[in-house]
Structure formats: C-alpha cells, structure tokens
Image (cartoon, helix red, strand yellow):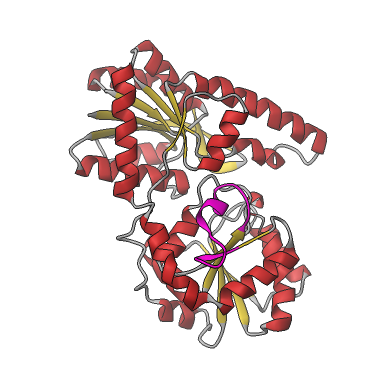
Amino acid sequence: MRIAFYTDTYLPNKDGVVVSLINFREELENRGHEVFVFASGTRKAKKENKDKHVEIHTGTTFTPYPDYKIALFPFLSERTVRKWNADVIHSHGMATMGLAADRAAHDLSLPYVATLHTLVPRATHYVSNNNTFKSMAEKMTWEYLKVYYNRADVATAPSKAIKQLMVEHGIRHTHVIPNGVDLEKFLPEGDGEKIRKRHRLEKNKVVMHIGRLALEKNLEVLISAAKKMLKKEPGIKFLIVGKGPAEKHYKQLVKKHDLANKFIFTGFVPDDEVNDYYAAADITVVPSTFETQGLVTLEAMACGKPVAGADCLATKEIIKNGKNGYLFEPGNAVDCAEKVLETLRKKEQLAKNTLATAKGYSIPKCTGKLLKLYRETIKKK
C-alpha cells in the first residue's frame, strides 16, 4: 500500500504530531508499505532534507506555534501524489498542507483520511485575551473543522474524548485511532542517577513535568500547588523539562511564588536523554486540559512511572485512580497538591500497573488499527 502523509509540522520539530507520524511511518514500512510525507518547513529544512520520501514545502512561521509553518505553495504536492500513484491520502494537519491533502484527494478521487491531532479551538488565548472574542474564535474554529473534516471519507481522533467532541460539533464518520508509544525506546531501565547528579537531586523526591512549555499546559496549577505540597514534603524538587513560548512566563511565576530554589527548568533535552529524565523522576504530572491523547502520560508509564493528571479529555482515559496514578480536578491547585502527594506516597504500588497500561498503546497495536481503517476506506471508495 502507498500512503501519502500530509502535515503542517515535521522534522526537525519533535512535537507530538511529528512523533506519531514517525512512529506510524516506521511501523508501516516495516510491514512492507510505502509512506511519502508532504510537509511544510523552512528553506533550510528543504535544503537539508535527504529523504527521497519526504517533500518539504517552504512556508512562513505561524506565530502562535513557531514550529508550525504555513506552506505557501502546498498544492504543487498533487503532482508528486499523481506520479507516485498513492493508494490513500492521510492528512495530519488542518492548515495549508491539510488543504493540499483535501484537494489532492478530491482531484485524484483517492481514499481520504484526516486526523485531528491538536485541539485548536481551545488555543484561542494565542489570538486574544478578550473572553468574548475567544468564545467567538472558538465557535468559528469548530465551524471550520466541521467543514474540513467532513470532506474526508473518514475522520480520526487519537482518543474517545476527542471523538466525542468532534461528534458534538457535527463531524461525521469518526473513528478512534490512538497514536502509539515506542516501548523499545521508553523503558524502565533509564539512567536516572546521571540526571539526578547533574541537577543535584540525589536526596530529593522529584516531581517532573515534561513537554512543550505553552500556556495551554496549565503549568501554573502545579506551581500554585507546589507551596502546599512543600509544607508536607519539604524535600520535593520540581523538574520542568522542555522549552516553549511560555517558558519565561512560568519562570517569572515561580519567582513570584518564591519557589526558584525548588523548580529546575532544564530547557531543551536531547532525544537520547528523555528516557533518563523519566527514570530520574519519582512521578510525572500532567496538569494540561489540552491533551488529545497524552503521549507524555504513556511514555512515563512505559518507563514505570505513575502519573498525576488533570481529570480531563484523553488524560482521564489513561490514568485510573489508585491503579497507575491519580486524577485531580482541572485547575484546582489544592486537589492537584493532594493527588500528587498521594501518587508519591503510593508510587511503588502504582508502578506495578503502569507498563501494562502503556502496552495497550504499543506502536504495532495502533498501526494495526490504522491499517485496518485504510483497507476499509479503500474498499468503500
């Protein structure tokens, strides 16, 4: 089978969308299928690209998400799709590369699958702080997504929660296809001691947040909860791993709460050290109410670490209270503090169930579901 992926973000970016694309592509190719990636990117990325199955379309930076590029001439990709003789088109974006996928699929009468990876309607804070405007922008965004995804033969969501939202907003023919977690990369055997020594955490209990530092990650909830936790467990240190547009904001918030000596911001972490950071932590915290699936939650569990997370969207589908972690009320710092402490107290008991949870989202298992959907879509088309 020949599959054309379209995306508005790609390497060298390493966000959740890119990780899921790479994981699916590698597993599909391991099974004998061919995958061609059409992506937006910089001129540098286009020049340095040596992958004959990747076509970069240069574009301008999307200010709210600098890693995303708005391709200026994405429709030229149709020539390659026609020449390559694709069997199915799979859009992983909704901006200009997504529109190019739509046109190519309809012009060439090809089976067309489109995935909603990012909950864009809930990111209106990038546009304005005015609540009325944000409400209007959210409605308008859902209307656009309704039109866009209903043009596909099949629309997929990475979790039941996102599928439900899509259905509620009028998107038809929806299926749940989770993104897989790499169980060969994320393992309980990471070198946590190396990371603890690097950041002088040998004697501390470590609570980690890992991922892109953006406002929608709700890290302020953890920062507010930190003081409450420290009254009961003064030896806790908070390890904030990653970078992003809100990094400066969160650092200032930590100083405002007089917690600079308790929070460690690592900045960018090399890919080959991520597993070691999971190993260094006692638990991971996910306060975000923006997660369409929550790969961080699954990665942490694959590394044998329980997770405390906001009782919202995809996170609540993965975390089971008292089994592999604890859920707290979204935005509630008091409840967050209590559930993080409870997760810390029972970390060894909870860790016994985390790997079993992650195995349910293995790359081979998720790719099998995707392949089945492709075959059904091609057959119907």
- From this viewpoint, is residue 55 visible? no
Which residue occupies 36% across, 63% down? Answer: 186
Q: Residue furthest left?
A: 32
Which residue occupies 55% across, 58% down? Answer: 243
Q: Is residue 274 above or below residue 293?
A: below
Left or right: 8, with 380 as reference point: right
Instruction: Give the magenta part as a residue range.
Output: 310-326
Q: Is residue 67 magenta?
A: no
Q: Where is residue 128 in the image (x, y as percent from the top left)?
A: 75, 38
Q: Where is residue 33 in the image (x, y as percent from the top left)?
A: 21, 35
- Between 178 and 115, the one lying in front of the other is 178
Q: Quadrant of the C terminus?
A: top left
- Figure quadrant of residue 58: top left
Q: Is residue 318 magenta?
A: yes
Q: Where is residue 333 in the image (x, y as percent from the top left)?
A: 73, 64
Q: Position of residue 253 (x, y in %)?
A: 74, 64
